[in-house]
Image (cartoon, rainbow, N blue to C red):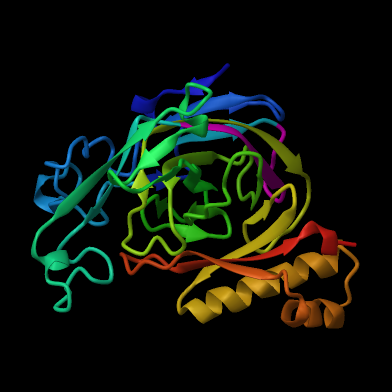
Amino acid sequence: MQRIIRDHARKYAFDWRDEPLLRVKLGESFEIETYDAGTGYFKTEADKAIPANRPGFDRYPPMANPIGGPVFVETVNRGDVLVIVIEDILVGNQSWTAVGPKRGPFGESSRWPELSLEHTTKIFKHFPGPSGTMRDGTLRFSDRIQWPITPFVGTIGVAPDREVATSLDGQGPWGGNLDSRDVAIGNRVLLPVAHDGALFYLGDVHASQGDTEFTGTAAETMSTVRLHFESLPKKTIPFMRIEKPDAIIALHCAKPLEVAVKTAIANLMDWLITEHGYSPTDAYCLMTACPDLRVNVYQMCDMAKLSYVAGAELPRRYLK
C-alpha cells in the first residue's frame, strides 16, 4: 500500500505548484501519516505554547497545522468532484491542547485571570480499547473524566484554482482548515476540483473536539489515515459536502456566523432541489419545519483569518 510518511507530511500550504508525493488510481487505498497541529512540538506539559519557543513562529502566518500531499489522482480532472472515502483513522498514544495569553476568546480575560496570565499545555493520554488499539480507545482528560476517542480530519482539501492558501487559515469551497467532526471514518467528503489530478492534501487530525473548537485547539494528535478516492465527473457543487450513511451535510464558511449558517442552509436547499426532486418552495419550507434539520457549528474560534464553519444536516429519510 502506498503511503506518505510523517516526515514528508510537513507542508504548510495548499499549493498547486507542489510536485505530487503520490499518484493513485480511483479506488486505490493508501495512507497518510500525519503530524499533530504543532508538528510534534508538544510532548509534555512543560512544552508551553510560547511563540518565541516554537519552530516556525518567527513568520506570519506561522508554520503550524502541517499537511501531507499533494496526492495526484489519475483520471480526475478540473471540473470534476473528488469523493474522499475515509476508511480508517488510527491516532497516536496522546493528544494535547494549549491555552494562554492571547489564545482563544478568553486569552485576555479579566474575569478569569488565570486564562491569560500564563501559557498552559494539557496532555491527554490515550488508552487502547477492547481491540487492543486506539480505534475503540479512550481519552483521559483527568483522573475523573474520560471519553471515547472520536477522531476526525481537521484540515482536508485540494489545491485552490490560482491562489496559494495556508494550512492554518486557508478555507474555501475546495476545503482547508474547516475542523468538521464529520470528516470521519465511514463518511464521504465531496470537493470541487480546480486542477487535473485534484492535488489532494490532508492533516490536522483531532482525537476529539467539541462544537466550535472554542479555544482554537482541540485534542490535537498524530495519526495514520487510510482512504481512497471516487469521482463524479463534470459535476458542480457550491462548497464541500459530506455524505454520512444516515444523513447529508452541506457546509459553508464565512463571517459573521449567521452568513455561514444561512449559506450552508442554502447549499443544502440547492442539493435537495438539483438532485432530490424538491421544488424550491418545498425545500424552503422543509428547512424551517423539519424537526430533524440540524445546523452544526463546527468551528467558531477567534483565530487568525479563520472564518466560521457551519454545516446544515438532514437525515437521508427525507431524500426523494
Q: Percent from the top left, x then y, of residue 250?
A: 66, 63
- At x 83%, y 70%, the residue is 273
Q: Is residue 112 left or right of residue 165?
A: left
Q: Is residue 31 left or right of residue 302?
A: right
- At x 76%, y 70%, the residue is 270
Q: Picture quarter containing residue 252?
A: bottom right
Residue furthest top in the image: 1
In the displayed structure, would residue 200 be above or below residue 213? above
Q: Percent from the top left, x then y, of residue 64?
A: 29, 47
Residue 313 colored in magenta in the image = no
* Residue 66 visible in the current orientation: no
Q: Percent from the top left, x then y, of residue 269?
A: 75, 72
- At x 68%, y 26%, the residue is 25
Q: Picture quarter containing residue 302?
A: bottom left
Majority secondary structure in the magenta region = strand
Magenta stretch: give its range.
75-90
Q: In this view of the protein, which residue sits in the foreground, 116 or 52?
A: 116
Residue 80 colored in magenta in the image = yes
Q: Is residue 268 left or right of residue 276?
A: left
* Residue 61 visible in the current orientation: yes
Q: Quarter holding the N terminus? A: top right
In the displayed structure, would residue 6 be above or below residue 161? above
- At x 67%, y 73%, the residue is 265
Q: Quarter holding the C terminus? A: bottom right
How many numbered circles are shown?
A: 0
In the displayed structure, would residue 143 be above or below residue 242? above
In the displayed structure, would residue 262 be above or below residue 10? below
Q: Percent from the top left, x then y, of residue 166?
A: 38, 52
Q: Is residue 227 left or right of residue 129?
A: right
Residue furthest front in the image: 144
Q: In this view of the protein, which residue sits in the foreground, 212 or 31?
A: 212
